[in-house]
Amino acid sequence: MDTVQRVVVVPQEPVGQIQPYLHGQFAEHLGELVYPGVYVGPESSIPNTDGLRNDVIEALRPLSVPVLRWPGGCFADDYHWRDGIGPREQRPLRINTHWGMEEEPNQLGTHEFIAFCRAIGAEPYFAGNLGSGTIQELRDWVEYCNFAGNSTLANERRTNGAAEPFQVRFWGIGNENWGCGGNMSPEEYAAAFARYRSFVFNYPGTEVEAIACGPNGHDWSWTRRFFEYMKKRDGNCRLRHIQGFAAHYYCGTAGTATEYTESQWLELLSKAYAIEGIVTGHRSIMDEYDPQRKRKLILDEWGAWHPVEQGKPRSGLYQQNTIRDACVAALSLDVFHNHADKLYMANIAQLINVLQSLLLIEEDRCIKTPTYHVFDLYRPHKGAQAVRFLTAAETVSNGEASEEACRSCYLDKQPFALRAVHGSASVRDGVLCVTVVNTHPTQPVELDLEVYQGKLGEMEAVTLASDEIHAHNTFEQPDVVQLAAAKTLQAQGSQLRVSLAPGSVTRLMGRLG
Ligand code: AHR
């Protein structure tokens, strides 16, 4: 591979506004995420506020998490919201049927989750139960949360301590209903969606964004058949009930979370990059039914899924998180920014101690993962205007290494080739923010960044890098992988030369001339 690589940013070509929701998160009642990741109870010796862990809140607050999806996942379609309201000592003990038949004590329910969202500044996104719940149950949960007036349900919410409505806008109508949420065909789900959705009302002050269950990865036929059914029934009428359509895509693993070869590094990043095909493929099918893009494409769940760490229960989905996962996160966020015109929300799975998490907790300790640092580094993109980012960097993996990468090509049937450098660019108030990933585990890159017909001056560079491709943070050594101190670089006209360490993520920011 050549050491010198080139990328071009075109500020004259806006792509779309980067919805902050593209940096969303997901929290399911699964493994250690909710108990004790979020909730330890007011009596716990772990410092908490009304049962919610202080260390976790402190760690998440600076990220301005835009949205938090809850309570699942598969858990959502076996969750009955009434179990989680009222005096905590009277709440029923249930079984978490999807995740190891563990006890579900219902100590964190609707009120506690809303309190957590408020503490970290996130907007709640509730996944409703279509699989095993009734239409009435979902209908009532929405009224309980959102009705400001005088009704038995709104008054019950008041009795339980919330005088004002929660104003929950995002409601998922089921989760993975092609699988754990009921094993339905697209037509069966579409029919169920139409019925459940009809009774999810907009109470004054809160307009609901109803989110339909989308496909698993590259299952193009789920998307087509769902929209075909919704359209065919009575013209376009039922399409109006859909505000969002949510796909899931996990890039999986190659090796394990902490043990992998250089070629497995590239394999995982190729599979991660294939998420671009998921976004463009499903959006292009949706465009046939919804050319004005009134229905938002969402990625409800995404990220790496490694084998569970030894010594941890299989059902808890606990995995370590290395610099390779940081590159997975950065590459994916860059894809989302580059498709800001097509994608509205994306929620990485999951927040704490489950899959590709931002935080790891153990007893009274809480550490930030390399993935956390990527979300931190990429913050300036949120809400900014994405502009065209073109990479002329050479191919480091042609995608054929991964079947998933091949199957994810809906439009051009070409595998998504992983380049030595990927990235994205945005502009806000005349300040350019460019993020780049050197995807190669061992080769450094001298990057020539050109701003087309533009001028750059001083640029601030912040990097997430490591000398070791398996580097990760532990409770004993929590800062092995962390953001380096900012450096100032000087551009020449429209060009900036910047050194990118192997397997690293860099943010460059400066005023456009
Ligand atoms: O994130 C873990 C699980 O992955 C979720 O519960 C489910 O929706 C998906 O299959």
Image (spheres, rainbow, N blue to C red):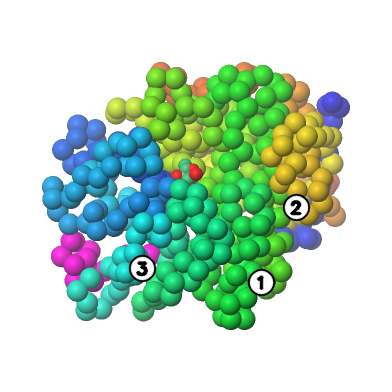
Q: Which residue appears at 82% of the width and 45% of the height?
A: 414
* On screen, residue 21 above or below 324: below
Seen in the picture, residue 275 relative to 464 is either above or below; the reply is below
Q: Earlier in the sequence, mark 1 or mark 3?
A: 3
Q: Is residue 367 left or right of residue 265?
A: left
Q: Position of residue 156 (x, y in %)?
A: 18, 67
The structure residue drawn at horizontal position 70% and vertical position 67%, both measured from the top left corner, is: 287
Q: Is residue 210 left or right of residue 431?
A: left
287, 166: nearer the viewer: 287
The verdict on residue 156 being magenta is: yes
Q: Which residue is mark 3?
A: 135
Name the chief secondary structure element in magenta.
Answer: loop
Callout 3: few (<14), some (14-19), or many (20+) C-alpha neighbours within 10 Å? some
User: Which residue, given by chain and number where applicable, does mark 2 sit on?
Assistant: 410
**Please, what is the three-letter code of the amino acid marked with disc 3?**
Ile
Viewer-closest of 147 and 220: 220
Assign a secondary structure to mark 2. Answer: loop
Span shown in magenta: 154-168
Between label 1 and label 3, give the one nearer the viewer: 3
The spot of residue 398 in percent (x, y) is 80, 35
For mark 3, give the secondary structure.
helix
